[in-house]
Image (tube, rainbow, N blue to C red):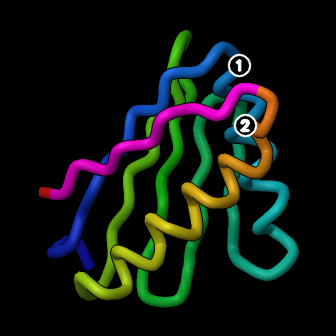
Amino acid sequence: MAAFQSEARVAMETPARYLAQLCKHFQHKLAVSLAATTGEIAFEGGACRLEATHDALVMRRDAVDAERGALLEEVLARHLLRFAFRTPPGIRWIRS
């Protein structure tokens, strides 16, 4: 599954809060693991590993193909922007 990867480093004041919010949101329908500063969400056809640093939420995405990868990027960005609506962060995915 590692053939289609990307990463977004999203600068924000409370990254651990948004990491937890994303994981808790998706855990109702998907397999999710959550710790204080890390999390992982298993999507159909891909996964996202999350890490909260002191000033950023790092989202690393793996997918089975480019189309699924683009969809996962859009879903993750849309949800993060919904949760961080008061101070919308800039999200830029870098594909490897």
Q: Tell me the element at label 1.
A: loop
Please determine whether, in this image, residue 83 is positioned above or below residue 30: above
Residue 36: x and y in percent read 71, 30
Residue 83 is covered by the magenta coloring: no
Q: Is residue 55 left or right of residue 62?
A: right
- Residue type beneath disc 1: Thr
Describe the element under mark 2 as helix, strand or loop: helix
For the residues marked 2 and 1, what is the alpha-carbon distance in whole angstroms? 7 Å
**Residue 96 placement (x, y as % from top left):** 12, 57
Report whether 18 appears left or right of 39.
right
Give the magenta range.
87-95
> Residue 53: which disc?
none
Do the residues bearing badges 2 and 1 touch, measured as CB atoms within 8 Å? yes
Q: At x 27% / y 79%, what residue is drawn?
A: 1
What residue type is disc 2 on?
Tyr
Nearest the viewer among 85 and 36 is 85
Query: Who is closer to the viewer here, 64 or 80?
Result: 80
Which residue is more in the foreground, 25 or 84? 84
Query: Residue 12, located in which quarter of the rendered image?
Result: top right
Q: Residue 41: x percent and y percent?
A: 60, 64
What residue appears at the point 50 percent right and 22 percent down from the top-left corner?
11
Residue occupied by mark 1: 14
Give the main secondary structure of the magenta stretch. Answer: loop
Taking the spot 75% from the left edge, 37% from the top edge, the residue there is 84
Report the label total. 2
The residue indicated by pointer 2 is: 18
Task: Answer few, some or many: residues within 10 Å of disc 1's Cα (few below 14, many 20 plus, some between 14 and 19).
Answer: some
Answer above or below: position of 75 versus 55. below
Left or right: 83, with 47 as reference point: right
Residue at horizontal 73 percent and vertical 54 percent from the top: 23
